[in-house]
Image (spheres, rainbow, N blue to C red):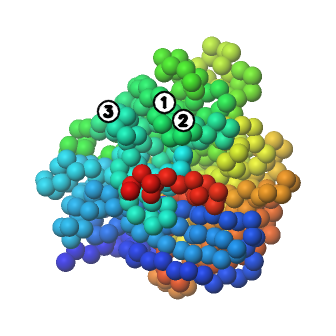
Amino acid sequence: MASFPDTIHFTGLNTPVRIEWNAHDLDVIGEIPREIDGAFFRAVPDPAYPPKFDDEIVLSGDGMISRFGIRDGKVDFAIRYVETARYKAEKAAGRSLFGKYRNPFTDDAEVQGIDGTVSNTTPVWHAGRLFMTKEDGLAYEIDPETLETIGRWDYHGALKSQTFTAHPRVDPATGEMFFFGYEAGGLCTPDVAYCIADKDGNLVSEQWFQQPYCSTIHDFAITGKYAVFPIFPTTADLDRLKAGGAHWAHQQELESWVGIMPRYGKVEEMRWFKGPKGVSAFHFVNAYDDGDLVHLDICLSDTNAFAFMREAGGIHRAQNELGGGLVRWTFNLASDEEGFESRVIGPPGDMPRLRDADQGRAYRAAWYLTINPQGGAPLPGGPVGAAFNAMLRIEPGNGRIDMMPLEPGLAISEPVHVPSSEPDHEGWLLAVIDRQLDAGRFASELWVVNAGDIAAGPVARVLIPVPMRAQIHGAWVSRERLAQARGRAAAA
Ligand code: V55
Ligand code: FE
């Protein structure tokens, strides 16, 4: 009988839970503001079966979609598996059939041709539909009410890309969703599909271009005028995959690139800027344009933040010795220079969160997670194996930085932002907090924090009676938007 490996990918906060459950009226300590009315959806990788290979990583876990439903100060909870083609095939077999992370050459022969994406990265809401995404495949549509999986989402057959990013960007004014897929033409291809879905969810544009090399394009950004594609030197190689190796290897000596094109323009108008060698970023806070300038705020590190991507490239550095910071890159589109300006605007960290209304625009404040050296040893687990223990609020306009530090033994996952109806109120942040009980045991809570006063700590805490595996990303969907859901109608 196979069992889960005793590695950081399957222990600590990454201990498999594999429980589909729901509950009403969880215990609340404090008062949840009544204006918080809607659903906090979360993507949680949680492997249904022990992996075929002992060196399996947390990013391969089967996606679970989880929801905190909040209304009148009360909280309901539900979580269930995304029933991907892969999940269904493995459930039928009663064991893992797919092999190493994004390496189909290591899969069992019987699953050749079955889609291997695990839908575990980001819940996305657009045009009345809820999706679960993973960048190596198409999204799956989810019923926001029952959390049942409706099916693979390809815009009624219109989308040609084989992949869909976990980080689309929705323009708050137009309601359009800008997105892309890399390896759009298949494994290790440099093809990138750049796409726009209109406010009603129709695919209105899909154009393909080639990136400088086949890199992991995890996130991108839009401004009012532009689409921005940063390319970092973590690359895929078909021969390495055929030899049973890793999908990604970080190349410390290779340049990074940033492609900028008019967001409604042609991919032939893409302008490529050359960036520093060896750097890496998975998430961008935001971007905006100002005359001929484009500002891009990124959670940058001096090498890849994932140990397994570093090690495949022969880079051996401890997780707590990576350099980086929140960095603003500024591109001058009026100049012919290949370079651009860079300045640090905040401490190192990741999992940034912006108000939806600020997407693509100059913004006052944003929030992200960091490791506070005074907060004790980071809890083991999460995507990179060491969990964040503090949240920051930054104001790039004036350099102000606030922190919500956690006590030793606590960890925080990416928050979502809930807008307030009061004009001068910055709204609320919701985030799952994990607390270490003893050696291998943890308990989780949902915290509600005033976004404009994070240093004050939570105004309410919701106790969760079942262990929770570390989440990747989340999404807040207001009651008003939930009422516009069209998934059920489409499925019926
Ligand atoms: C990331 C997450 C993924 C993945 C690739 O956060 C990159 C970065 C949860 O899955 O497959
Ligand atoms: Fe991400």
- Residue furthest to the top: 336
Distance from label 2 to label 3 (Cα)? 23 Å
Q: Are marks 2 and 1 in contact (CB under 8 Å)?
A: yes
The residue wearing badge 1 is 204
Q: Quadrant of the N terminus?
A: bottom left
Label 3 sits on what residue type? Gly
Residue 27 position, x and y percent, is 63, 84
> For mark 3, what is the residue?
185
Q: Amino acid at mark 1?
A: Val
As drawn, 386 above or below 152: below
| Amino acid carrying mark 2 in the image | Asp
- Residue 387: which quarter of the image? bottom right
User: Would residue 339 be visible to someone looking at this image?
Assistant: yes
The image's mark for residue 198 is 2
From the viewer's perspective, is 450 left or right of 114?
right
Q: Point out the frontmost of discs 3 and 1.
A: 1
Q: Is residue 244 left or right of residue 439?
A: left
Q: Secondary structure at mark 2?
A: loop
Q: Can you give x and y, in whole percent of width and height, for residue 244 in the image?
A: 22, 49
Disc 3 within 8 angstroms of ligand 1 (CB): no
Asked if residue 281 is positioned above or below residue 62 in the image, the reply reads above
Nearest to N terminus: mark 2 or mark 3: 3
- Quadrant of image for the C terminus: bottom left
Front residue of 122 and 271: 122
Dot 3: element: loop
Q: Is tag 3's residue or tag 1's residue first in the polypeptide sequence?
A: 3
Circle 2 crowding by C-alpha within 10 Å: few under 14, some 14–19, many from 20? some
Question: Residue 381, percent across and down?
Answer: 48, 68
